Amino acid sequence: MDAIVGVILQSKKRDQLDDLQKKLEANIDKVRQHANQITNALKALNASEHSLGIVYLLYAKSTLPKLDESFLLEVEAFAEGLDGEQTRRAANRFAFVTNRYMELCRDNNLAARGLKYLKLAIERFRKSPEYLTPLHSQFLCLCLKTKNYKAGHSLVETKIFDVDTNITGLSPKDMLLYYYYGGMIYIGVKEYGKALNFFDNALQKYVLVSLLSNGKFLGISKNASNLVHRHVKTLCAPYVDFANAFEHDDVEKALKVLNENEQSIKSDRNLGLMKQCLSALHRRNIQKLTSTYVTLSLADIAKTAHLKDAKEAEAYLFKMIDDGEINARINQKDGMVTFEEDHESANFDSAWTSQTLDSRISKAIDLTKRLKRMDNEISSSTAYIARLHGIREEMFDLDILRGGSGRGPRNTGAGISRMMMEMWR
């Protein structure tokens, strides 16, 4: 272990770091055999100067079946001072370390503690806020564990434009978890439209959230994978039946679907979400009454909206009035409800409305310009062109694409082409 620490201390330049990484990769099993010495070894290293070496030491320790408080403290100390460029050299190893850290925090009631250090790690590890990393899903997992939707919301609101696996070590699983957990965060803050965009490949939740967002199921997202399209009937039959009942305001049929499939829906971890949809259906039925009646008794509202009794109807009305969904007055003496026209909701001339519209238009314009630039970059890249035309890597040659024979004595594009094709593997 002393020899390994010595090599790490001496490796600071780029070429030295390349050699160091090769040696550490080749000797990772030997490092693991001396895991009991890693704590002392880390004391001799500085996170900002020796990040690459520290990542490998922490990785070796993280592969042990049992980890204690010392591992948590060591990861936390590293998160506070790590050098992003060095750490990204061993992105996969680092992601494994932070995932083990997250699991320990999640399973030992330390999730709130873990949030602080995973947030620090994300900020220092990512190349810029536009990059998605494996740490994103780990952080969101702890947000859900602690029901800290505010912290998670702040992360998912950051626009992602790059998922370069070579830089971040991101895997398909990491990406799927990010969108799944992110969708759950949006449900937690009741931003159902945004949640819907995160559930393209979580079909059961996509169906239910579409009811909360659009009032009906509009069909499978075009962005969903082929696997989702093939198995929609097998995986989602009760959910589609529930959605059909919801769309037709049929509370009785919706309740029947829920009751008949309650155990499977519960095992899918969707029971709470389906009950939210049922509540939304009750509210929608109440809302429809406001366009038909001026006054109505609580008992009649309960009957029309398929609620248990007048007391439950009153509770729904209070909540809807409080949330601004309807404008009404309840006379508790005689049990009558008077629906009133909401003049404020029709006021589009307020300064707040104008500012909000201006802000959203500006964001849309900026996003459109950004996407246009990205589209131009991708469509003109040699890797994309080769992929589009089905050119095999060994045949791909910039000179050929330019119309030449590709057989000249010096082909400067071939090396670049091969390097870019690596990105598509």
Image (cartoon, rainbow, N blue to C red):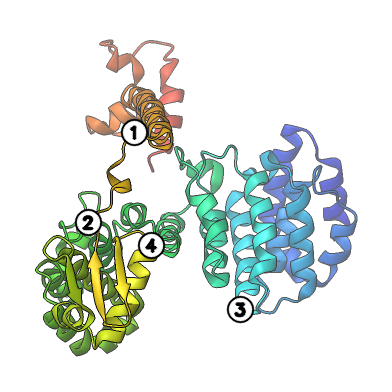
Within 10 Å of the Cα at label 4, are there few (<14), some (14-19), or many (20+) other Cα atoms? Answer: few
The amino acid marked with disc number 1 is Asp
Q: Residue 349 carries which label?
A: 1
| 48 w.r.t. 399: above or below | below
* Residue at position x 31%, y 60% in the image: 325
The amino acid marked with disc number 2 is Asn
How far is mark 2 from mark 3, CA to CA? 37 Å
| 335 w.r.t. 174: above or below | below
Within 10 Å of the Cα at label 1, are there few (<14), some (14-19), or many (20+) other Cα atoms? Answer: few
First-in-chain label (2 vs 3)? 3
The amino acid marked with disc number 3 is Asp
Tag 3–tag 1 contact (CB < 8 Å)? no
Tag 1–tag 4 contact (CB < 8 Å)? no
Residue situated in front as seen by the camera: 74 or 327: 327
Within 10 Å of the Cα at label 3, are there few (<14), some (14-19), or many (20+) other Cα atoms? Answer: few
Within 10 Å of the Cα at label 2, are there few (<14), some (14-19), or many (20+) other Cα atoms? Answer: few
Q: In this view, does 339 lie to the left or right of 183?
A: left
Pointer 3: what residue? 107
- Residue 275 position by quadrant: bottom left
Say which quadrant the C terminus sits in. Answer: top left
How far is mark 4 from mark 3, CA to CA? 36 Å
Pointer 4: what residue? 323
Say which quadrant the N terminus sits in. Answer: bottom right
Pointer 2: what residue? 214
| 317 w.r.t. 345: above or below | below
